[in-house]
Amino acid sequence: MKPTVYLETTIIGYLASRRSRDLMTAANQQITHEWWDKHRQQYELYVSLPVLAECGAGDAAAAQERAAFFSSLPVLGASQAAEELAEKLIQGIPLPAKANVDALHIALSAVNGIRFLLTWNCTHIANAALRSPIERICREAGYEPPTICTPQELMEE
């Protein structure tokens, strides 16, 4: 069985967006495309209802371009367990209220036993300062936390 990967919204956004003029963002977009083209087949990929909602927001044409990247992927649904874990993450880290959906991405990954959470959100998700509290809170709730990483960290040669 292949290792599982939860694709957080930023991954889909980087795949579907036009190349950025910002050098760091452009580099991250390129890395994301390289991971998608050369490495994604090694994993079983998942998205969630919150990812679908975030990707569906905004310009209809852009939303349709984003949807092309996840239309064939399994979708993790919301659950009471994930909602409760997300609330524990918000309270225990603590995360700002605007990071509700970020906490839900982590919680959905943990509750569903997903091995990797792939993201470019380095503010509230892939943040080294938050790693220990995220892992502690997940384990205290009875879940193994996902390994939170960027596409660059999940490339196997």
Image: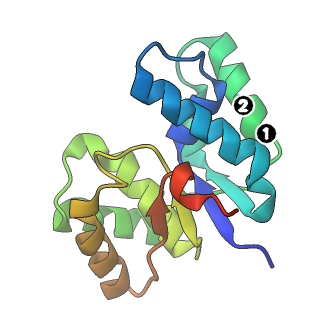
Q: Position of residue 30 (x, y in %)?
A: 60, 32
Q: Which residue appears at 81% of the width and 57% of the height?
A: 41
Mark yes or no: residue 79 visible. Answer: no
Q: Is residue 155 left or right of residue 133?
A: right
What is the residue that sits farthest to the front in this orientation?
157
* SS for dot 2: helix
* SS for dot 1: loop
Of residues 29 and 122, the one nearer the viewer is 29
- Which residue corresponds to mark 1? 71
Q: Quadrant of the N terminus?
A: bottom right
Of residues 22 and 66, the one nearer the viewer is 22
Mark yes or no: residue 44 visible. Answer: yes
Label 1 CA crowd tier, 10 Å (few <14, some 14–19, many 20+): few
Which quadrant of the view contains residue 115?
A: bottom right
Q: Position of residue 108 (x, y in %)?
A: 51, 63
Q: Position of residue 36 (x, y in %)?
A: 71, 44
- Which residue corresponds to mark 2? 67
Which quadrant of the view contains residue 78?
A: bottom right
Which quadrant of the view contains residue 15?
A: top right
Q: Position of residue 23 (x, y in %)?
A: 43, 22
